[in-house]
Amino acid sequence: MGLEAKLTQDGFFTTTLDALIAWSRKSSVWPMPMGISCCAIEMMAVGGPRYDIARFGSEVMRFTPRQCDLMIVAGTVTYKMSHVVKKIYDQMPDPKWVIAMGACTSTGGMYRSYPVVQGIDQFLPVDIYLAGCPPRPDNLLNALIQIQEKIGRTKGRDFQNKPLPQLNVIQNN
Amino acid sequence: MKEIILARLKTILPNIQVETSEYKDELTLHLQKKDVVDVCKVLKNESELKFIHCADVTAIDWARKKSRFTVVYHLFSLKNKFGLVIKADVDESDCSIDTVSSIWRAANWHEREVYDMYGIKFNNHPDLRRMYMPEEFEYHPLRKDFPLLGIPDSLPLPKK
């Protein structure tokens, strides 16, 4: 970072608030592991010591959506499951990002049939589509790095005056 | 084993029609659908037979006018180490058959699955709800006239 060298000179430095916030946001992305099927195994490998997502500040996988800002949808999303995915996404606080991990999640993949949603972008705003069936762990890390670059470009005003999400309460569930 | 099964059925239930076929040492009984429950009771409870394991209940859609569906029961006797298949034809106009879930409790969910996928109703079933598809879904996906990619807007998606 070179931060220490700066601090030993004058004891302060100047930056913009946007840059500081974006920098801290992108360096501690907390993922929501939405592991639905086999892609989740590769996601677990990313959490382990060999690939080690902690190198990118994202080792804090929270199993509650309320503490997360990145949703990794890892697996085949059926129509029945889509309501659950959306419900969990709605509970995540803004600002939030989504990785569609793997062929099934991005396009339906090899499940070109009636129960599977042919791409989760039909009901979620997806930031990164990740190829592979399942993608290799380093591919997921690449997606995380790209998300970090995207977060680094954000400004505070991007998130202002956003309408509140409408919570869809599902009956009989 | 085949002779014992047929002899026991003949003596206990003399009035039923049974046709048999064999494929690679597997015996199949073709029955009228009204006789299935009676035959199954005998197969399970007779001390020589003891088909206590109902491995699967499934169905076939032949996509034809007369006797469109066939319901298939896979039974196994742990005592005799012998597997048996029972088949019964079901018409599309009277798309129902009596349940065997009172005989084997395992048949409960198997029959729910057949109901979900083929729309065959099981009379006297204690809990005939869909197994996989949502409750409000109107179609039966494993029927031959159901398109592979489903019917558009038949399954609800959350709003974006």
Image (spheres, helix red, strand yellow):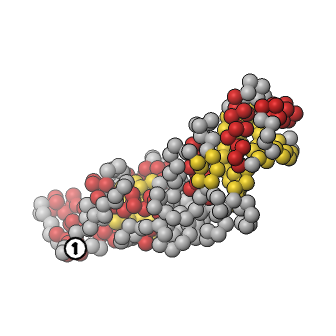
Residue shown at 25%/61% (left/top)?
A: A93
Q: Position of residue B47 (x, y in %)?
A: 74, 24
Between B127 and B143, the residue placed more toward the observer is B127
The residue positioned farthest toward the top in the image shown: B47
Between A130 and B46, the residue placed more toward the observer is B46
The residue positioned farthest toward the front in the image shown: B15
Residue shown at 85%/32% (left/top)?
A: B7
Q: Is residue A107 visible?
A: no
Residue labelled with disc 1: A162
Q: Position of residue A168 (x, y in %)?
A: 31, 64
In the rendered view, does A62 fall on the left or right side of B118? Answer: left
Between A167 and B111, the residue placed more toward the observer is B111
Where residue A123 sits, quadrant-wise, is bottom left
Look at label 1 and name its amino acid.
Lys
Image quarter hosting the N terminus of chain A: bottom left
Between A170 and B86, the residue placed more toward the observer is B86
Where residue A151 sits, quadrant-wise, is bottom left
Q: Is residue A7 visible?
A: yes
Give the tally of numbered discs: 1
Image quarter hosting the C terminus of chain A: bottom left
In the rendered view, does B25 fall on the left or right side of B63? Answer: right
Residue A12 position (above or below residue A60): below
Pointer 1 chain: A
Label 1 packing within 10 angstroms: few (<14), some (14-19), many (20+): few
Residue shown at 81%/44% (left/top)?
A: B18
Residue shown at 50%/51% (left/top)?
A: B129
* Secondary structure under the numbered disc 1 in the rendered image: loop
Q: Position of residue A49 (x, y in %)?
A: 45, 46
